[in-house]
Image (tube, rainbow, N blue to C red):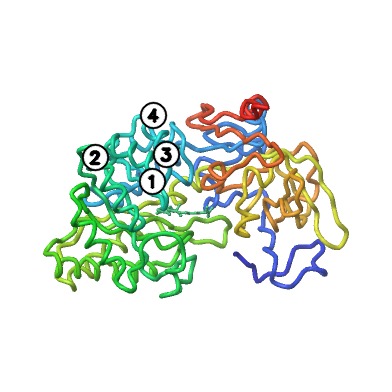
C-alpha cells in the first residue's frame, strides 16, 4: 500500500484521516513513466496516446472498457529479462498473468519459455506454436488428463507439487513409454510479500512440499526411484509483488542446502534450480521496482555463492516472471458514466467496467493510479474513488486518487499497470462482457482477444 505523508488535496482535506491519502501530483496531466507503458504519452491536443494512437480513436474503434497493450513495451521487457539472464539461465514467462496466442508468439520470437498452470493455458500455448520443450507445466492438482496431454505433447518439465503427483506423473509417463523431466516444488519456509518475509511460517499453504521435517528430501528420494521420471531440479516460488531480494536469498540458501543433501545421500547433483516469479512492479509512483539486470545479477550471485559454499557445481537457474513482464505494458481505458460528489467525503466516479475486469482492488486491496485520458485539465484536483457498475459496494477499481475537478460523464479515464492478473482474472459477474485486449504497436492496433458478446454468454446457457 502506498501511503503519502502529505495531507490530502485542497478538497475535503478537513475530513480525511491524516496521511491516509496520496497527495495529488504536482500536475495531474503528467504521466509517470514508472507506472505507464513505455510508448504512452499525450498528443498536441492532450489526449493520451499509446503506440502513437490516441485513446479517443481506440475507444471509438474498439469501445470501452478495453485493455490497451503496448506490444513494443511487452517485447522490450521480455527481451530485457532474456538478456539479463543470458544463455546460462532460462526465463519462463508465467502465463497466468496474461496469456493469449499473440503473447505466446511474442515470447517465442523473443526467446522466452512459458510457464502454464492449467490445461487451458497449455492448449493456448500449444495452439500458438510454442515448442513443447520450452513449456513448464505447474499446478497443485493437475488432472490425469492434463498430465497425459502434457507428457504426450513433450513439455520440457512438469513441476511436481505433492507425493500423489509424483506417483501419478511417473505412472502416466511410464505407461506412455516416456521419461518425463520434472522439478519438485518445495516450500522453504519463506513468505515474501513486498518488503517483508516471514521465515518458517509459510508451510501452511497448498503449494509445494515442505522442506521442513524432511518432506522435500523424502519426495526427492521417491521420485529418483521412479523410472517414469527424470528429476532435473528443485523449484521454489516465494510470493508476489516482491521488491526486497532477501526472501530470495533465504530461499536460495535453503534450496541449495537440499541440493547438497541430495548429493550427499544419492550421489547426484541436480542440474537445475527454479526460483519462481513474484518480482514487483510499480502500480503507483510510490513503488520502486528493480530492473531485470539487477535482479538477474542478484539472483545469480546468491545461487553461485551458496553453491560455492556447499561445494556444488552451480545449477542452471530459471525464473518465472509474469507480472514484471506484462503488468506495466497495459492500461484499462474506461468511459466515465456518472460523477457523484459526496459532500465532506469524496467524489465517486463510476466507469463502464469494474470488478469484473479488475478484481485486484476488491480482492487484495491493491492500489492503482488513474489519469484523465481524453483531454488535459487545469481544474483543481478532487479526491475520487473510481468504482465500477456492478451491484456491489466493494466494486472499486481505484480506491483513492485525484482527478481534475471538472471530470464529467463521457470523459475517458485510464488505469495503468493492469496488464497482469486483470484480464486473466476477469469474470462475467452480473453478466458483464469481458473487455477486449487491443495490442498497439507503431501506429497500428489490432484486437488480440476480442470483446465478449451477449451471444457468447447465451451460448453457454443451454437452457
Ligand atoms: N511461478 C509460480 C510458481 C507462481 O505461482 C507464480 C504466481 C508466478 C511464477 C508468477 O508470479 P508473478 O511474477 O506474476 O508475480 N493473482 C495475484 C497473483 C497470484 C500469483 C500466483 N502465482 C495478483 O493479482 O496479484
Note whether ligand 1 is within 8 Å of mark 3: no
- Which residue, given by chain and number where applicable, does mark 3 sit on? 119
Q: Marks 3 and 2: CB-CB under 8 Å?
A: no
- Which residue, given by chain and number where applicable, does mark 2 sit on? 175
- Which residue, given by chain and number where applicable, does mark 4 sit on? 127
Mark 2 vs mark 1: which is more N-terminal? Answer: 1
Mark 1 vs mark 4: which is more N-terminal? Answer: 1
Task: Answer with left or right where residue 241 lies relative to residue 179.
Answer: right
> In 3D space, how far apart are the residues under numbered discs 4 and 3 (Cα atoms)?
12 Å
Task: Answer with left or right where residue 165 lies relative to residue 226.
Answer: right
Mark 3 vs mark 2: which is more N-terminal? Answer: 3
**Number of numbered discs visible in the structure rendering:** 4
Residue 407: name its quadrant: top right
Secondary-structure class at tag 3: helix
- Which residue, given by chain and number where applicable, does mark 1 sit on? 93
Mark whose residue sits in front, 3 or 2: 2
For residue 420, above or below residue 298: above
Mark 3 vs mark 1: which is more N-terminal? Answer: 1
For residue 463, above or below residue 330: above
Amino acid at each position: 500500500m502506498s501511503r503519502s505523508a502529505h495531507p490530502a488535496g485542497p478538497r475535503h482535506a478537513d475530513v480525511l484521516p491524516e496521511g491516509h491519502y496520496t497527495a495529488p501530483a504536482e500536475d495531474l496531466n503528467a504521466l509517470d513513466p514508472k507506472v505507464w507503458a513505455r510508448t504512452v504519452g499525450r498528443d498536441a491536443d492532450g489526449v493520451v496516446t499509446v503506440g502513437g494512437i490516441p485513446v479517443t480513436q481506440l475507444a471509438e474503434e474498439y469501445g470501452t472498457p478495453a485493455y490497451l497493450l503496448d506490444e513494443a513495451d511487452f517485447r522490450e521487457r521480455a527481451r530485457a529479462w532474456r538478456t539479463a539472464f543470458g544463455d546460462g539461465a532460462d526465463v519462463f514467462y508465467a502465463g497466468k498473468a496474461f496469456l493469449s496466442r499473440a503473447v505466446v508468439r511474442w515470447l517465442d520470437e523473443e526467446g522466452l519459455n512459458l510457464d502454464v498452470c492449467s490445461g487451458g493455458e497449455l492448449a493456448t500455448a500449444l495452439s500458438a506454436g510454442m515448442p513443447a520443450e520450452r513449456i513448464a507445466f505447474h499446478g497443485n492438482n493437475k488432472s490425469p488428463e492434463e498430465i497425459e496431454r502434457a507428457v504426450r505433447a513433450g513439455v520440457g518439465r512438469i513441476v511436481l507439487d505433492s507425493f500423489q503427483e509424483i506417483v501419478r506423473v511417473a505412472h502416466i509417463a511410464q505407461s506412455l513409454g516416456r521419461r518425463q523431466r520434472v522439478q519438485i516444488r518445495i516450500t522453504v519456509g519463506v513468505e515474501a510479500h513486498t518488503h517483508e518475509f516471514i521465515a518458517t511460517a509459510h508451510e501452511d499453504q497448498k503449494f509445494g512440499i515442505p522442506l521442513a521435517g524432511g518432506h522435500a528430501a523424502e519426495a526427492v528420494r521417491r521420485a529418483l526411484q521412479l523410472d517414469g521420471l527424470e528429476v532435473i531440479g528443485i523449484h521454489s516460488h516465494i510470493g508476489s509483488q516482491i521488491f526486497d531480494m532477501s526472501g530470495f536469498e533465504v530461499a536460495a540458501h535453503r534450496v541449495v542446502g537440499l541440493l547438497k543433501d541430495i548429493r550427499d545421500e544419492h550421489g547426484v547433483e541436480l542440474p537445475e534450480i527454479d526460483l519462481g516469479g513474484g518480482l514487483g512492479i510499480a502500480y503507483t509512483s510510490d513503488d520502486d521496482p528493480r530492473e531485470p539486470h539487477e535482479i538477474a545479477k542478484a539472483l545469480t550471485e546468491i545461487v553461485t555463492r551458496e553453491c560455492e559454499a556447499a561445494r556444488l557445481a552451480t545449477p542452471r537457474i530459471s525464473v518465472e516472471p509474469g507480472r514484471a513482464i506484462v503488468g506495466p505494458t497495459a492500461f484499462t481505458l474506461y468511459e466515465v458514466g456518472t460523477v457523484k460528489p459526496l459532500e465532506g467525503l469524496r467524489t465517486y466516479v463510476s466507469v463502464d467496467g469494474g470488478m469484473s475486469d479488475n478484481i485486484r482492488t476488491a480482492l487484495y486491496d491493491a492500489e492503482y493510479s488513474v489519469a484523465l485520458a481524453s483531454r488535459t485539465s487545469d481544474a483543481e484536483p478532487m479526491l475520487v474513488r473510481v468504482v465500477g457498475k456492478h451491484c456491489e459496494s466493494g466494486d472499486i477499481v481505484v480506491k483513492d486518487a485525484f482527478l481534475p475537478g471538472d471530470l464529467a460523464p463521457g470523459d475517458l479515464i485510464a488505469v495503468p499497470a493492469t496488464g497482469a492478473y486483470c484480464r486473466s482474472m476477469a469474470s462475467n459477474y452480473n453478466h458483464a462482457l469481458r473487455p477486449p485486449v487491443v495490442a498497439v504497436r507503431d501506429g497500428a492496433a489490432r484486437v488480440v482477444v476480442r470483446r465478449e458478446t451477449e451471444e457468447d454468454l447465451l451460448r453457454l446457457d443451454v437452457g
